[in-house]
Image (spheres, rainbow, N blue to C red):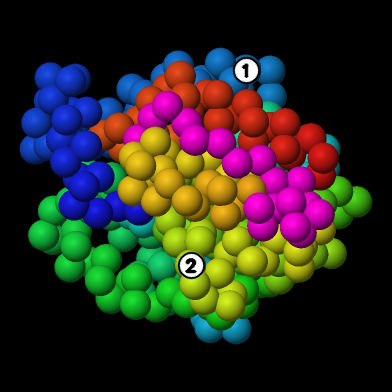
Amino acid sequence: MCDDLTALEEEQALAAKGLSRREFAAIGAAGVLAACTAQESQAKGRALREAMVSVPTPDGTADAFFVHPVTGKHPAVILWPDIAGLRDAYKEMARRLAADGFAVLAVNHYYRAAKEPLLATMAEWRTPAGQEKLKPAIATLSPAHTVRDATAFVAWLDRQAAVDKRKGIGTQGYCQTGSFAIRSAAALPKRIKAAASFHGGGLVTDQPDSPHRLFAQSNAGFLIAIGRNDDAKAPGDKDALRAAGQASGRPVEVEVYKADHGWCTLDAPVYDKAEADRAWARLLALYKGL
């Protein structure tokens, strides 16, 4: 999870790129767009349609980014952004997935507190102002809220013309929302058939409803991609996840990647394209089963 140790590792990653944290924050959205340029080829030959949408939930109205190929019906995916919330980086990641043939709903899981973007880039998460914005938003999250939201998101997706309801739904989460993907799959076994956690936090706890104890409640396949520094801090988690997966009878792929926490997120200081692309390939392989 994001903490003081990952902050130090982010500083080291930025130093290796010749940047200070202030300089990285200054390039902000421009840096995200530059990082995304190499991915534009993913969308060639497949026109996309996108829009900000409103999704009714039991607790209000969630704003979300919906993107899908212009023609045809496609498997749906719920994309839960990391701790900094829905922003340009995750919209671009949603576009990339849509270009691979999916109808993607990238959600603002902080909608109870504020509309997106709560923070414009990951760099803001480390600033005092960013922390102050996030505190009340994080306080609105709970496992029960995640389940209610996931249920509403699935219902909304199943009403969309671009969604192929004959296919299962996929879901993926990053950082704090890695657990959201697992909880969603357990809560909606009839519709969610694949779930992925990238550098997810809180997957193994001593609570009865710990995410690693929920595999058996699902009908999904799982991809659990762990950062090497997260593994160094909790080396037993990967073993607990593998054991829980085996006991559940569900296919659960657990791997420690040669990159640090946050490596899959485009605007993260530790973004690692090679390892992010490798994780992306495993995600697409998982979603082939939808």
Q: Are marks 1 and 2 in contact (CB under 8 Å)?
A: no
Outermost bottom residue: 58
Residue 14 magenta-highlighted: no
The residue that mark 1 highlights is: 44
Residue 163 visible in image = no
Residue 259 visible in image = yes
Q: Secondary structure at mark 2?
A: loop
Q: Secondary structure at mark 1?
A: loop
Q: Residues within 10 Å of mark 1 (few under 14, many from 20)?
A: few
Q: CA distance from mark 1 to mark 2?
A: 43 Å
The residue drawn where x is 41% and y is 68% is: 110
The residue drawn where x is 56% and y is 48% is: 239
Classify residue 183 by image quadrant: bottom right
Q: Nearer the viewer, residue 154 or 234?
A: 234
- Does residue 251 lie above or below 151 as drawn? above
Where is residue 121? Give x, y as percent.
28, 45
Identified by mark 2, the residue type is Thr
Classify residue 248 by image quadrant: bottom right
Q: As drawn, is 70 to the left or to the right of 5?
A: right
The residue drawn where x is 42% and y is 39% is: 227
Q: Which residues, given as a range, are shown in magenta?
A: 243-261
Residue 247 magenta-highlighted: yes
The residue that mark 2 highlights is: 205
Q: Nearer the viewer, residue 290 or 29?
A: 290
Identified by mark 1, the residue type is Lys
Query: Which is nearer the N-term, disc 1 or disc 2?
Result: 1
Which of discs 1 and 2 lies nearer the camera? The answer is 2
- Does residue 214 lie above or below 167 as drawn? below
Q: Nearer the viewer, residue 272 or 148?
A: 272
- Does residue 280 lie above or below 88 as drawn? above
Image disc number at residue 266: none
